[in-house]
């Protein structure tokens, strides 16, 4: 069995559009269990730290501004093959390329404001979960 957890955020655009509930419902319906959950906003510095791997990419400044622009929901999700199954559920980074029925196809506004984050590897799922949650906050 590979990777039982993944990390997600419901990004500020989806929170603003009142889509926290519908997105969490899709996550549960797809068989993921919520192991940790919080509602918070990031400072620019925290958003920059979270996305530090993208520092050299041209959209980094825009991404940091956007991810610190309003509250978001952070969560740890559990399921067999959590990382790859969740990437399938959210769809492509660019919502115009995301498949029908995916979270990004349904809820994303643009390639930057694309509704949700999903970890890209088991290693990053753990690093990202540790960025947001202590052991006391996981069930
Ligand atoms: P992912 O979220 O699908 O893993 P990444 O390539 O890791 O995509 O990019 C991280 C985030 O950066 C994306 O979710 C999106 O919010 C933003 N992003 C990616 N590519 C672009 C772009 O070309 N323009 C603006 N923002 C982008
Ligand atoms: Mg990524």
Image: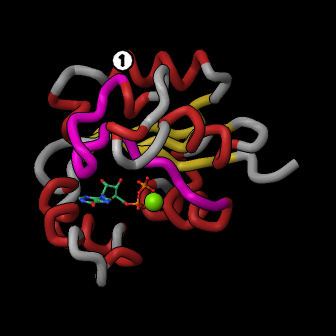
Q: Which residue is at a point 55% across and 32% down the rendered structure image?
A: 89
Whether residue 130 is visible to the viewer of this picture, yes or no, is yes
Q: Is residue 64 magenta?
A: no
Tell how many labels. Answer: 1
User: Is 129 in front, or is 60?
Assistant: 60
Relative to 28, say whether 113 is above or below. below
Residue 3 placement (x, y as % from top left): 75, 52
Ligand 2 quadrant assignment: bottom left
Q: Is residue 112 magenta?
A: yes
Whether residue 73 is visible to the viewer of this picture, yes or no, is no
User: Is 126 in front, or is 63?
Assistant: 63
Q: Mark 1 points at which residue?
A: 21
Residue 138 placement (x, y as % from top left): 58, 44
Q: Which residue is at a point 27% across and 48% down the rendered structure image?
A: 111
User: SS at mark 1?
Assistant: helix
Q: Which residue is at a point 38% across and 29% down the rendered structure image?
A: 105
Residue 86 placement (x, y as % from top left): 59, 39
Q: On the rendered structure, is 80 left or right of 120?
A: right
Badge 1: how crowded within 10 Å, few (<14), some, or many (20+)?
A: few
User: Is 138 in front, or is 60?
Assistant: 60
For the C terminus, which image quadrant?
top right
Q: Which residue is at a point 16% across and 71% down the rendered structure image?
A: 61
Magenta residues, dominant SS class: loop
Relative to 30, say whether 130 is above or below. below
Relative to 46, say whether 4 is above or below. above
Where is residue 66, by image quadrant?
Answer: bottom left
User: Is 75 in front, or is 19?
Assistant: 19
Highlighted range, magenta = 106-121
Where is residue 47, by image quadrant?
Answer: bottom left
Relative to 46, say whether 71 is above or below. above
């Amino acid at each position: 069995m590979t990777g039982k957890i993944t990390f997600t955020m419901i990004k500020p655009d989806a929170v603003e559009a009142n889509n926290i509930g519908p997105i969490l419902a899709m996550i549960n319906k797809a068989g993921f269990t919520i192991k940790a959950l919080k509602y918070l906003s990031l400072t620019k510095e925290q958003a920059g730290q979270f996305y530090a791997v993208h520092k050299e990419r041209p959209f980094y400044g825009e991404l940091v501004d956007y991810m610190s622009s309003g509250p978001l929901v952070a969560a740890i999700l559990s399921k067999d093959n959590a990382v790859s199954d969740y990437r399938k559920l959210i769809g492509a980074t660019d919502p115009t390329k995301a498949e029908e029925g995916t979270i990004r196809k349904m809820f994303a506004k643009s390639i930057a404001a694309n509704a949700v984050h999903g970890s890209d590897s088991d290693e990053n799922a753990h690093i990202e979960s540790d960025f947001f949650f202590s052991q006391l906050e996981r069930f």
